[in-house]
Amino acid sequence: MVVGDVTTGTEVLVIGAGPGGYVAAIRAAQNGLDTTLVDRDAYGGTCLNYGCIPSKALISATDVAHDARNATEMGVHADPVIHTDEMQEWKEGVVDQLTGGVEKLCKANGVNLIEGEATFVDDSTARIAHGGEGQGSESIEFEHAIVATGSRPIQVPGFEFEHEPIWSSRDALDVEDPPQELLVVGAGYIGMELSTVFAKMGVDVTVVEMLDGILPGYEDDVARPVKERADDLGIEFNFGEAASDWEETGNGVVVTTEDEDGEEHTYDAEKVLVAVGRQPVSDSLDPEAAGVEVDDNGFIHTDDQARTNVDNVFAVGDVAGEPMLAHKASKEGIVAAEVIAGEPAALDQQAIPAAVFTDPEIATVGMTEDEAEEAGFTPKVGEFPFRASGRALTTGESDGFVRIVAEEKAGFVLGAQIVGPEASELIAECALAIEMGATLEDVASTVHTHPTLAEAVMEAAENADDQAIHTLNR
Amino acid sequence: MTVKEFKLPDVGEGVAEGELVSWQVSPGDTVSEGDIVAEVETDKALVEVPSRYDGTVKELFAEEGEIVPVGDVIISFEVGEVEEGDEEAEAPDTEAEPGESTDEAKTDTEEAAAAETPEGRVFAPPAARRLARELGVDIADVEGSGPGGRISEQDVRAYHESTEEHDETADETPVTPGEEEAETPPGAGASETVSASDSPEAMRETTLATPATRNLADELGVDLDAVPTEKTRDGEAFVEEEDVRAFAERKESEGAAEAAAGAEAGAASTTAEPEREETVPYRGVRRTIGEQMATSKYTAPHVTHHDTAEIDQLVETREELKGTAEEKGTRLTYMAFVLKAVVAGLKEYPILNSELDEEEGVIRLKNYYNIGIAVATDAGLMVPVVKHVDEKGLLELADEVQELAAKARDRSISREEMQGGTFTITNFGAFGGEYATPIINYPETAILGLGAVEQRPVVEEGEVVAAHTLPLSLAIDHRVIDGAEAAKFTNTVKEHLAEPTKLLL
């Protein structure tokens, strides 16, 4: 049946049902606004379907196998066998549960859900094209719109994802039959997370990276434990090389890279994973029709209320700029919804934490020592190595450290960098400290449970004031 | 000389505002650190506010009876040398014009601190940031009173209100609140009143105002949406205390004029009618009692069981023991005996010494006997708790009841002394009367009310005779227990009161 040109009205149209969009829609509905959420693909967006959740599921599963295999020191001898198809089935179950949950939450909060691709007609109308032949389209008149269209993986010229041996991260996460050899292009966080997953599955992984190290943007000593662990896993790195060409062979591909001197190198692989970053999805939306300005990189600029240059159009999440993080998207979504509802909301976070689920994990929030200095502070730094943590030693994971950066005078916490076990969890305390304007003394004087990894945060704060008990004060 | 402002400190857990009950000082008075300058009543207690400085009182910023939010400046002092690092020393000169105050009045300490904090970075928690947005305050302008200059919600509120004051006085000759009142009779030509008359009642749907202003409007019976104002916040009309007072005064004078006109028209007597109504503020301890009573009444289904104890023997026993007790310095009251009798009853029927924990879905039986004694005070009903009644003798109990009641009456009782009760006794008989319906001291399960000890007619062996009786009114939470248990408990109490020797067992 053809659904003709029906026009409906809504107070808030949210485009994109990822962690920015669905959260915005729920909050808008909670605030009594008639809200419509449209998505062309799947509830939960990239995060739930093709990103955070499936990757963390596979990371956890392969960690179990790897840890069991390497626990002989603890007296545990095991030889686990990975059934990738079953692993995928479990991962899909997790994803389905979460995406189903999002749909239920939206409905329970009274959000109208529509499947289809939204395109702006003007600043108060959007056209929704429904997927599938003969499904037609409809128009929605909105009072406010929230653009939450997210991002997609960047393609390297010549390495388009439609070619079967060339994988995007999404393809890699769905694999049921892992290749013998995998070439990963890019040593950023996605490249490093997935390299680790495949190496733990027993795949021979080679990484080529244009820059001269892994995880650009992180301090050397933060990235170092990850590189060392990757080396231990047998991952081979080739820095200063850019992938330039590939061709199929009988049982895989040969990839050619080029270094700074123009010298070519070749790599045999069964599959190639291209993980060189993500770009915003704004082109399909025709933002110009609504008068919304988009920069050369496809990002929509917003103010501290998530508002674009058009008063009634807001943008949140990856499409609204770096950092491309799900939790930042959700926060922006809430702010946009509250601003539309007339609340005095604003994006005034002092710091947004970020985590990389490599082995070991990395998590950071706020300023590094250098950044604090550049910002005009006199920084004071405390560190605690996990090798001095009782809990870390009992888990067999004692690489890495907690570093806490504060300003010298009152000791306000400005930032923290953690590399080591459960860094992604531990960073939350540091983020709270920054937001609350807590000082080193506040953190150090808070009694932490023993034996836990969290004690490392307390000890790092003590160390900054030369009061650490379990490590030498620097 | 330096002017120092003093903000109403946080006087207790969770207390956001207090009523300034009385000033103990006036402008020009010399004070020393520790001298009491004001009394403030919160919903928890009456608190004396000491001066933190040696100096002279310069100005009082709140009137007696006014509700003051914690963090508001209430008084300023002129003091000598400023001690380095004293936070309060950094308060801006209140006489300064807006704009000047933040720049010129900063002390060296403040500038030094500012120099080390790069521009744009403000240390304040999210709640304070949100409040600043709500009030339209740029948080970077607010001076933090926390360690290292951390900004609290109170700092934001205080800054907002101080700038509001500047904004208002900027267009007029500065007057202190006291002067304003003295020189501005109701409805008599003050510019604010005139402008209020020019624009009669506003009819808005939404009006923004601080909680203190809302309280004031309630007290004065003023509809905030009707108060004229040209001030706005976030695009909504914003009304302040001054607007409410001016509006109320205008309404009052209009009402008086109408009444006078009506009186003339009706050629009625010229004798002024007494006021038909007056309002008494519902706040402080009175409001707390009210809220607790409502919680109890509407949570626990009350059943009241009435009975009468015949206590001739008890009257005799007390008479006998009174002299001995007095020699030991104790005034032996019936309450001491009642306490013992009640504990005997509670031991036999522990269900009355309990509370219903709705969240956990359990009834908590208490194996200790802390009995609350309701005491009428000038401020309202207070319930000091006599702890471990079962472990104490009659004289000890009598002394303790006396002491706690005295403390409750002079408001020196501590919170701890009013907490931890398991059962309560209320002695309304002290004021006469027989039976009443006591409200359970929630979440306890029962309360025993005592009527007056008097001789009343009772029937003994078919004859009506006079006997000393004590009327008992036991209210129970019917969710926890039924009337049968209430009756049985009361019987045990009666038996022990009728035969005081049983109290020795």
Image (tube, grey):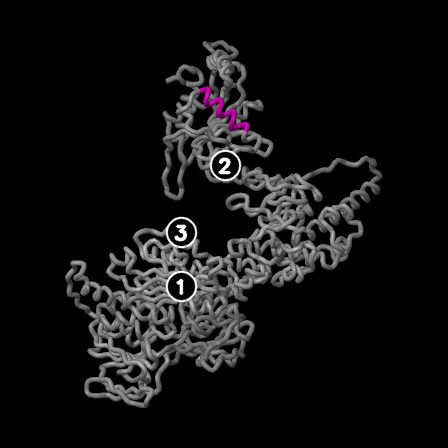
- The image's mark for residue A416 is 1
The residue labelled by disc 2 is: B415
Q: Where is residue B166 in the image (x, y as percent from the top left)?
A: 68, 57
Q: In which quarter of the image is residue B104?
A: bottom right
- The image's mark for residue A446 is 3
Magenta stretch contains residue A399? no
Q: Is residue A39 above or below residue B252?
A: below
> Are dots 1 and 3 on a single chain?
yes
Q: In terms of depth relative to the viewer, which is nearer, A311 or B12?
A: B12
Q: Would residue A22 be seen by someone viewing this image from the given angle?
A: no
Q: Would residue B442 be seen by someone viewing this image from the given angle?
A: yes
| Cα distance in 3D space between marks 2 and 3 | 27 Å
> Are dots 1 and 2 on a single chain?
no
Q: Tag 1: Cα neighbours inside 10 Å, few (<14), some, or many (≥20)?
A: many
Q: In which quarter of the image is residue B66?
A: top right
Q: Which of marks 2 and 3 is in front?
A: 3
Question: Chain ID for label 3?
Answer: A
Q: In this view, does B454 lie above or below A224?
A: above
Q: In this view, does A156 lie to the left or right of B118?
A: left
Question: Chain ID for label 2?
Answer: B
Which contiguous range is marked in magenta? B394-406
> For numbered disc 3, what is the local secondary structure?
loop
* Quadrant showing the C terminus of chain A: bottom left
* Quadrant showing the N terminus of chain A: bottom left
